[in-house]
Amino acid sequence: MFSKEKAMIIVEKIKETRLQAILISNELQEINYDLSIIKAQIERKLIKKMGGEKKLAPTEEARERIFVLARNADEKYVELYKKSISKKTMLEETKVEIKFLQDKLNIILAVMKNNDSHD
């Protein structure tokens, strides 16, 4: 029923899934970096256009509301933001898969140990 071979298959799958999580995490970092650059460009453009931060809006909170609307109007930013959310979801799903495989491996090992103790 449960064997060392089956356990090793699951160990290999855990390894593959962990490597997949690393790749997704790296992609997410790249997307977040790109988002930060686009965000800065959008904000800088507005500040420059208005002749300074205070002329754009008198308070930091008011400026941030304007920046949020400006980012939302930028197609590239919105596209990357959605891609970021998708990658975050993929990463969380991968983490759940890793946890599931680890739990499965633990059950197999426990059954194997129990079977060995009854022999």
Image (spheres, rainbow, N blue to C red):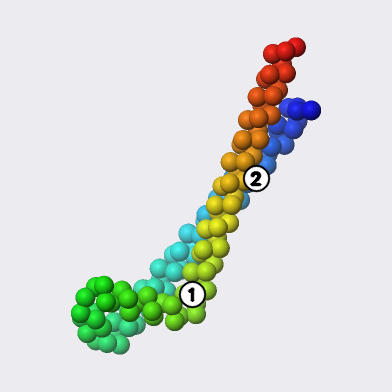
Q: Residue at x 56, y 63 (%)?
A: 86
Query: Which element is circle 1 on?
Result: helix
Residue annotated with mark 1: 78
Is 86 positioned to the left or the right of 54 in the image?
A: right
Alpha-carbon neighbours of circle 1 within 10 Å: few (<14), some, or many (≥20)?
some
Front tag of 1 and 2: 1
Mark 1 vs 2, N-terminal side: 2
> Which circle marks residue 66 in the picture?
none
Q: Is residue 58 above or below residue 94?
A: below
Number of residues whose C-alpha sits closer than 10 Å to that of mark 2, classed few (under 14), some (14–19) or many (20 or more): few
Distance Cα–Cα, label 1 vs label 2: 31 Å
Which quadrant of the rendered structure holds the C terminus?
Answer: top right
68 in relation to 104, above or below: below
Amino acid type, residue under disc 1 in the picture:
Val
Q: Residue furthest right?
A: 1
* Residue 24 visible in the picture: no
- The percent position of residue 59, horizontal first and vertical second, equals 21, 75
Q: Are marks 1 and 2 in contact (CB under 8 Å)?
A: no
Q: Is residue 51 visible?
A: yes
Q: Position of residue 77 (x, y in %)?
A: 47, 75
Residue 16 disc label: 2
Screen quadrant of the N terminus: top right
Residue 52 point in image, percent of width and height: 23, 82
84 with respect to 52 (left or right): right
- Residue in front for this viewpoint, 18 or 111: 111
Q: Who's the residue at 70% across and 31% down the image?
A: 7
Which kind of residue does numbered mark 2 sit on?
Glu
Give the quadrant of residue 50: bottom left
x and y percentages locating residue 80 in the rendered image = 51, 70
In the rendered image, which quarter is residue 71 located in? Answer: bottom left
